[in-house]
Amino acid sequence: MSSIVSVQGLTKVFPGGLKALKGVDLEIEEGEVLALLGPNGAGKTTLISIICGLTTMSGGRVTVGGHEITRDFRAARELIGLVPQELHVEGFEKVINTVRFTRGLFGKKPDDALIEQILMDLALWDKRNEKIIELSGGMKRRVMIAKALAHEPRVLFLDEPTAGVDVELRQSMWQVMRGLKDRGVTIILTTHYIEEAEAMADRVGVINHGELLLVEETGPLMTRMGRKTLTVDLSAPIDAVPGPLAARGVELGNGGTSLVYTYDTAAEQTGITDLLSDIREAGLHLADLHTRQSSLEDIFVDLVNGSTR
Amino acid sequence: MNLQAIRAIYLFEMARTFRTIWQSIVSPVISTSLYFIVFGAAIGSRIETVEGVSYGAFIVPGLIMLTVLQQSVTNAAFGIYFPKFVGTIYEVLSAPVTVIEIVIGYVGAAATKALMIGLIIFATAHLFVDLPIVHPVWMIAFLVMTTFSFAMLGFILGIWAKNFEQLNLVPMLVITPLVFLGGSFYSITMLPPVWQTITLFNPVVYLISGFRWSFFGTADVPVAASLAAIALFAGLCLLAIWAIFRTGWRLRS
Ligand SMILES: Nc1ncnc2c1ncn2[C@@H]1O[C@H](COP(=O)(O)OP(=O)(O)OP(=O)(O)O)[C@@H](O)[C@H]1O
Ligand SMILES: [Mg+2]
């Protein structure tokens, strides 16, 4: 597998001194879907903006399709489609005209059949002659996606494509993304929704404070993220975890007043039923119990602290 | 050359122009007619001829220049400021286009519109005065060179401007005085010697002088000097635009 996008030692220092990217290395394979996750201000948009030519880099090297993005910018950018995070539209233009405009801007000959297909796929065909200002927010976002697709990019950057989009539309966008993936388009998307990464991505990258903390296959990462802890508060403190419970990996918490059990929600058997009967057989009395999903934030914190559970 | 891109930008901008074509044409035509009535009729009845040309005809090149310069600057400034303002500039910045292609597209469209308006004013002027044109080819050439070079100035202005006030300020505060003081309504030979010298630092003098020469065959400054001045001005603008895109000033973070 060859990388279609290669990022090496990429740094960005904004005027004013903020280090938005601190040496990012990332290889993106042709045809894959990569989801970039990370809290607000992590540097996701900055990374995408540099690759697409909207922001200048401070150091490092980026190639797209083997073309260095500043020296060989024409060849590199022809391959790229971008849907930025913010909604930017020319309100007084008709939908179809702005989509045609983008295609021309990227050096492609007019192709009305293709434009029609794209607008159909995004359920915008009926709106093609409307002014963009008259569309709803979700439709405007779809117009931006249509523009990004108009020149048949091989690499598509989607910066939070489903932010502020209703459930139904999100599903249909996922559908569009799958269609693109099937045609071999490489997709890099950022999102704050773990389900989205899970549903769409082959690999997930986690960025925080300008550092790429990990890039991993979605499956294993989700398993880790899918962990839950069950905390059982006891009515009286105990000194040690009784034998059968200890065998299940139960730990003592909170000075002996609670039992902590970590399990995998994705597993066939969570073991909770057995755990509860073991607790009863051990003669312990429950005061309360609660479960907690380890969240993306937990994973971030763990990663930042260098200890991955 | 990404010819498709040039075409796309140019047509997109021209479509914008034609959406508001009546506004674009009506106001310059009305203001030009007013100038004719006030300057041509009122003052012209007192000043019979300037350099052997009737005063009404004498001011036509200056009047055309006045509007054409303002139009070139504001059209181009708005053309690039607007996408910057609404954010759609991201597309142009991420597209496989060179500075030259962007400039030809935007500046070309702005210049075309200014040129059209210039020709409309020229036609309007015919309603008021008899206009001989000694060098018609040069007249068009001067008009084209002027619209392009000042549209480039406007393009720079549009990138520089951070708000609509700044966008309006420069044409008002810089272009209009330069045109008025550049001999639109008089021959600079009518000025006292000191002012004649000072005036020679006004680039617009060279434009109007050359343009007027194409009409009447008489000029305030040598025609070669006019051409050199336009070339110099256009070259400087192009250089500035190149530097802007090179550094990403006010465009890329
Ligand atoms: N033009 C700019 N000038 C100065 N600082 C900037 C600029 N753009 C972004 N930053 C800073 O760079 C950091 C990274 O921002 P970025 O937009 O890349 O984050 P993000 O991961 O996309 O966040 P979000 O999830 O909120 O979209 C932030 O601290 C932000 O404040
Ligand atoms: Mg962002």
Image (cartoon, rainbow, N blue to C red):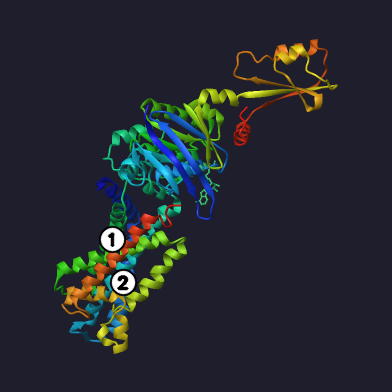
Res A275 label:
none
Using the image as rendered, state which of residue B38 and residue B80 is in the foreground. B80
Residue B46 point in image, percent of width and height: 27, 88
Give amino acid for label 2.
Leu
Is the residue B170 above or below the residue A16 in the image?
A: below
Q: Residue at x 28, y 73 (%)?
A: B63
Label 1 resides on the chain identified as B
Residue A68: x, y in percent?
35, 42
Kindly indicate the quadrant of the structure image that contains residue B145.
bottom left
Query: Would you say residue B23 is visible in this rendering?
Result: no
Picture layout, residue A120 above or below residue B113: above
Residue nearest the observer in this picture, B84 or A60: A60
Residue B3, how many percent across, how many down? 25, 47
Depth check: B70 or A44 in front?
A44
* Disc 2 residue crowd, few under 14, some 14–19, many 20+, Cα 10 Å: many
Q: Earlier in the sequence, mark 1 or mark 2?
A: 2
Q: Which quadrant: the C terminus of chain A? A: top right
Distance from disc 1 to disc 2, alpha carbons, whole Å, reads: 14 Å
Q: Mark 2 CB in 8 Å range of ligand 1?
A: no
In this rendering, the answer to whether A243 lies above or below B133 is: above
Q: Which residue is mark 2?
A: B66
Secondary structure beneath label 1 = helix
User: In the image, is A174 to the left or to the right of A274?
Assistant: left
Answer with the quarter of the image where residue B69 lies: bottom left
Q: Where is residue A51 shown, x and y percent of the image?
A: 41, 42
Amino acid found under the numbered disc labelled 1: Ala
- Residue A151 relative to residue B252: left or right: left
Q: Is residue B73 above or below residue B100?
A: below
